[in-house]
Structure formats: C-alpha cells, structure tokens
Amino acid sequence: MKHASCLIALLAALCLGVTDTGASQRGGGGPGTTYLLRPDRVFDGDTMQQGWAVLVRGQRIEAAGPRSNVTAPAGAETIDMPGVTLMPGLIEAHSHVLLHAYNETPWNDQVLREPEALRVARAVNHLKSTLESGYTTIRDLGTEGAGYADAGLKQAVNQGIIPGPRMIVTTRAIVATGTYAPKGFSPDWTIPQGAEEADGQTLVRVVRDQAGHGADWIKVYGDYRAGPNGEAMATFSQDEMNLIVTTASSIGRPVVVHSSTPEGMRRAVMAGARTIEHGDGGTAEIFKLMAAQGVALCPTLAAGDATSQYGGWKKGTDPEPAGIRRKRESFKLALDSGVTIAAGSDVGVFPHGESARELELMVAYGMPALAALKSATSVNARVMKMEVQIGRVATGLLADLIAVTGDPVADISATRKVTFVMKGGVVVRRSQ
Ligand SMILES: [Zn+2]
C-alpha cells in the first residue's frame, strides 16, 4: 500500500505523457515536477564529480554541473541529499524476471511445474524490486519456458500498469534441437524446453517469429551441456550462427549469445554477435578477438557465486571451488584483453533486487570500482545503443537517476544502499 501513490503518479505521468510544458509551475513532487537535486557528489557515468547539482524538468535532465552554474527555476522542488552519491540509474545487462532463485525452486521445476500465470505474478514483484534497487533498465535474456510473457510485462510497465525498469526483451530464446533442458526423461514423452528449438533454415523463420512476437534482441545458446558426457560443447554450426545474425540484423535485432566454450565464443564472434554471456572458458586469444571485433562480454559472476553456494560451498569459510577459481582467472584474462565488460548478473538465479552482487564481485575479482560503475551505466548504455537516452548524468538524457548512501568508488557495496530512485523524471522511491 505504501507505494500506491507512486504507482498512481507513474500511471498518470505515462497516460498524460509527461511534457516540459508548465512543469515548473506544478511543483509538489508529482509527475512534471521540476527538481533540483543537490547530493554530496555525482557519478556522471564516467567520473566522480564533487559539488554538482542536477536539474530535472519533465522526463529529462535539463542541466548538470557545478552548483553555481545550476540554479532552480521558480516552483522547482529542491532536494538536498547529504551523504549520498547521485548516479545514473543502473543497467542490468542479463536478467530473467520470469525465474526466481534456484534454491527456492530448481530451474527444472520452474519450467515444468509452474503455470505461466504464477510465473508472471512473481515477475510483477521482481520488476518492482528491481526498480527499487536502483536498476532502471534491464535486458531480460529469455523467459525460460514462459513463452512471450516478457513482451507483455514490458507493455505493462510502459503503460504504467505496474512499476518496473525499462525492459529490453528476447522472448523465448533459441537453442539447437536436443541440446537444451529439461533433460533425462523417457523418450516416450515430449518434454517442454526452456527455449525454442530450431536448426538450419528453420532458424530464419524462428528469428523472425520471435522478433514478430516482441523480441528486441535475439538470444541464442551457442553452446550448452550437449557433449556425450554432458560437457559444454558448441551447438550451432558456424553457418547456422551466421544465418541467425544475418536474419536478425536485417530486421534491426542485435544477437546475444550464451557461450562458455572457446569454440562457441569464437563462432559467435565470427558471426557478428553483439554480446557473449558467461564466457567462463574464454581464453586470452578469444577475449582479444572479441575486443578486436567489438563484441562485449557479460560475465555473470553472480550466477556461479550463487549456484556454488546452493551446492554447499560455505563462502568465506570453505576454500573456493574450482569453478569459482577458474571464473576469477578467466575474468582476469578478459580484463587484461581490453574486451568491453557489460555488467550483467543472471539475476533470477538469485533474488531479484540483488543485482548489485555483480558489481561487488567484479571488484572482488579485480576490476576497479569506477570501471564497474561505468560498466553498469554508460558502458551498458553503449552496448545497448541507448547512450543518447540513458547511462549518464548529462543534459538532455532521460532523468533515470538514483542516489546511494556513501561513495561507491570507495566502497562498491554502497550500490546496495539505494535511497532514491527516479525513472524518466518520476520519483519512484525516496527514503529519508
Ligand atoms: Zn541467463
């Protein structure tokens, strides 16, 4: 109930279409209010700025800079924010809002036993907690058996029916026949899969069909545990990957490839994928190839960290499992190679609203905190080709702004301490 008024305000803003006209006269904290925000410091998407103020009018940032240069027009609401850092709304490059934590319900059971309506009901809550945790944009990478529900949820957010971040969606995602999951049942049964199977020329139809059902990007599993002993192996051939990317590109859809093997990653790069997800088995050579071809790596460190703990690893007490050690090593190779790192956590494996785990792990695994913050803001915006709308605190961009207690460059875990969230100029969270 606490957030009912915010929701109504958000709905009103979206129905009316927030404009700049007369905004400064309205005041009072509703949509269309002009705000002058005065935090201790501003992370603008590139560097930390001291003594800045930010003026928001309507949906957009009207001015950002030294306080002496940014003044409040008549009727503006001034918000003093002592002790906090104002920064761009965070961008999650790899989420699954239609999944919930695997230690609550294993993935197989979510796909096979949970009705789609149940999954959508959960997703509504997940979107709310994501937004309130400071993530104002997500790239959601597959419904894992929940059809095209992500495309409907995106409409619900855009129409102001439910609160949530801006969504880039991929719908069902694509896997090579026989390679995905759930697996291990009698061949007498046809088991629903967590993504849509397609091969050869059928890929052309499936790419177009998913795009037609609302996919903004095309998500492909370039490898999976398809080897004779369940080991990860490249699935789609180079020709198939090329066909996917060519078909998707011609209708303006970038391709995102799940891949953990060097061969799967190499095929994805050669085909022209925009991002590669996980990349656990990436070598120095593959990461250099990605850097040279402008393919970003989304490392999803938080997923392995969570599943290892679900498997019994007592973090901080037990030695690190081999999988975590290998992940640290490959992430280091990626950092050294200069490949673009897109912050994405695979949230859904662990609870929604905790995507900041990824930023903490990026720093724990050797990335400077400032680089991790850039990754989750300006870099992710560029990867998504949305840099003229989001990802920085700069004049003319959408006012997707959050405030966190403390200085996240000094301590990255400050990104968990979100006290203020604004999306498109509308305040959606404000704690005193
Ligand atoms: Zn994922």
Image: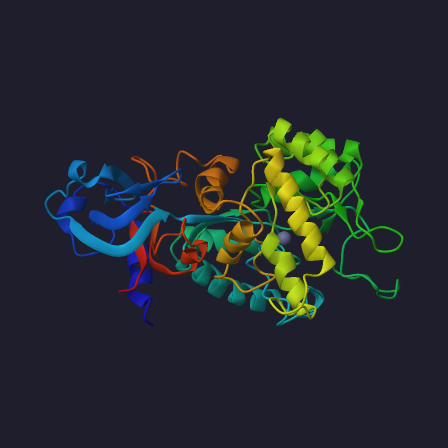
Q: Residue furthest left?
A: 74
- Relative to the observer, which residue lies in front, 181 or 160? 181
- Relative to the observer, which residue lies in front, 349 or 213? 349
The residue under the point 60% across, 51% down is 300
Q: Is residue 301 left or right of residue 21?
A: right
Quadrant where the C terminus is found in the figure: bottom left
Residue 278 visible somewhere in the drawing? no
- Please state the horizontal and vertical placement of residue 79, each as a whole percent of the image: 20, 54
- Relative to the observer, which residue lies in front, 124 or 64? 64
The residue under the point 17% across, 51% down is 78
Q: Is residue 10 left or right of residue 376?
A: left
- Please state the horizontal and vertical placement of residue 95, each as a whole percent of the image: 56, 53
- Please state the horizontal and vertical placement of residue 392, each as a whole percent of the image: 38, 39
Q: Is residue 106 left or right of residue 230?
A: left
How many numbered marks are there?
A: 0
Q: Quadrant of residue 393?
A: top left
The residue under the point 76% across, 58% down is 181
Quadrant where the N terminus is found in the figure: bottom left
The residue under the point 18% across, 39% down is 70
